Amino acid sequence: MTTQFVSEIDSNLIVNNKKETKKSIFKEYERVILDSLLQTFGLDFIILDQYGGDVDTIHNLEQVGDNSRMSIKNSETRLKYESRGEYDSHKYHSDKQYIARNREFSKQRKAEGIKDAYTKETLHKSHDLDHIISAKSMHDNAAVYATSLDPVTLVNSDDNLVPTISSVNRSKGAKSVNQFLSDWESTREMRQTKIKELHNKPVLTDKERKQLKKYEELEKLKPEEVKKLYNKSKQSMTNKLNKDYYTSSKFAKDTTKAALKLGGKMAVKQVIGFVLVEVWFAVKERISFCSGDSLKSFFSEILEGIKEGFAKAKSKYKEIISKIKEGLLSGIIASLMTTLTNTVKTLLESSVKVLRHASSAIVQSIKVLFFDKHNSWQEKIHAVLVLLATSASTIIGSLIGGYLAPILSKIPIVGELLVTFIEVFISGMLSCTLIYFIDKWNIAKKIVDFIQRLDINPFGEYVECMKQRVAAYEAYVAKLLEIDVDSIVKETRRYAQVVSILQSNNDDVKSNYKLKALFKDLEITLPWKGDFSSFMSNKKNQLVFE
């Protein structure tokens, strides 16, 4: 599917003879459909889409370890992550920040008591200092190793450390918040039963008293407070990681490299597809005129057709250059869109493929509308409709194939071939159907007629607004030209003198004297007469500003 092929389509074709419908469609659009299927399924081996895209994002890196399909793309980040070593609790709990924060809470608790972050109870006797996001979770978070931040320093920041009772802290341990709350909820009924049993006992052993205390303290836990604190701390951590990583040269280099790499691969795909389609039509034409009955003459015609196809492609070097530009731009846009999307949502390989084909269709549509030399807007709209119809068909075929792949790929030998066949068949049939109705119903003409009936110019309002602004600027410039620049300079200097007097002299008498002299020089009439103090002491006097 390429712009050059679309530009060759007769946009005024309307099929009237039902018997000739199929022939008419394939005669006009075989090149477009063939190129689209070839680009989508025949040459897709050139581009191997990765789960989560080609560039690491904080959102995706945080899934490493939990999601077996997620991988680290940057080799430096991968090395740092893999060489992080085993989790050492002592390393994280002996950090200076952790010790200093714990001392602050101890001092506050002994003086006036502190609020337990998870139960909201006031603590006086003792407390534990808990990492809201556990130290182990931070140690195993691959996103940290993509940044210049230290996991020990990060996890021991003030917004991730809170006081709580020992029962809660030790029950939570190195678990994630979700795992801790899930375990707490699943054992709640057991705890409540145990509490009743122990309360009904007349005498408790030391072990039972400790057990009762532990269960009662855990029952005081407020899950909504834990979630609230976790969300707040998680957002703070994410903001720190995002700021460090997305402003780093590593991310900029990886993004640029991935965009150019995909752009280059898509440019290669476009050129190879262009050449193969030329070869196909040359071979097809040779075979149709083959008069010999021998197998040798048949293969001879095929070889000649291949040579002609390559010669035709070579002669169309300008179109090949256009294909390279088109593929490069489409690849860069698709890569940037994939990376941007992966910052908030992980894309599957199929989604990356869809995004890539959609980007290609958008670039080609823009080229048709604004850069190709079509005779009318009807022809431009017709070409864009064919582009979008063909692109949509290949995307739908890919999605259906991806949905059936887990089932059909289990069939020995022919499984993968069957998936590809279904994708190509569905895409081809949809393309033919959609293009048929675009022609049969003359949709392009109807769109143009509809726009004309509205009697609107999409750029008219903008142009009129720009005209008004230009007129306003011209009027303003004309006023500026009337200004006496020398007078402005002299007046500005006098104002500067006033400011200088007010700023540089702390002596009120001297300032008063200088200001009066300046008023006289500027020919400003004072709003009072005589001595100011005597003037103001008379209630009948009024200040008069001229």
Image (spheres, rainbow, N blue to C red):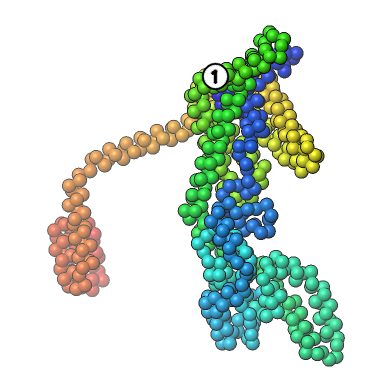
**Residue 127 position by quadrant:** bottom right
Residue located at (74% from left, 81% from top): 214
- Which quadrant holds the N terminus? top right
Q: Quadrant of residue 362?
A: top right
Left or right for 318, reference 197: left
The residue identified by callout 1 is: 312
Q: How many marks?
A: 1
In this picture, is 213 found above or below 248? below
Query: Residue 482: x, y in percent?
Result: 23, 40
Identify the residue shown where x is 82% and y is 89%: 204
Which x, y percent locates residue 408? 79, 39
Q: Position of residue 397 (x, y in %)?
A: 71, 34
Please state the horizontal and vertical placement of residue 236, each as a whole percent of the image.
56, 64
Q: Residue at x 69, y 55 (%)?
A: 68
Q: Secondary structure at mark 1?
A: helix
Residue extending farthest to the top is: 291
Q: Which image quadrant is residue 99 in?
A: bottom right
- Residue 524 falls left or right of residue 334: left
For the point 77% across and 83% down, which residue is it?
211
Is 31 rendered above or below residue 331?
above
- Residue 308 shows up from this direction: yes
* Three-letter amino acid code at the position of disc 1: Lys
Mark 1 is surrounded, within 10 Å at the Cα level, by few (under 14), some (14 to 19) or many (20 or more) other residues, namely some
**Residue 276, placed above or below residue 411:** above
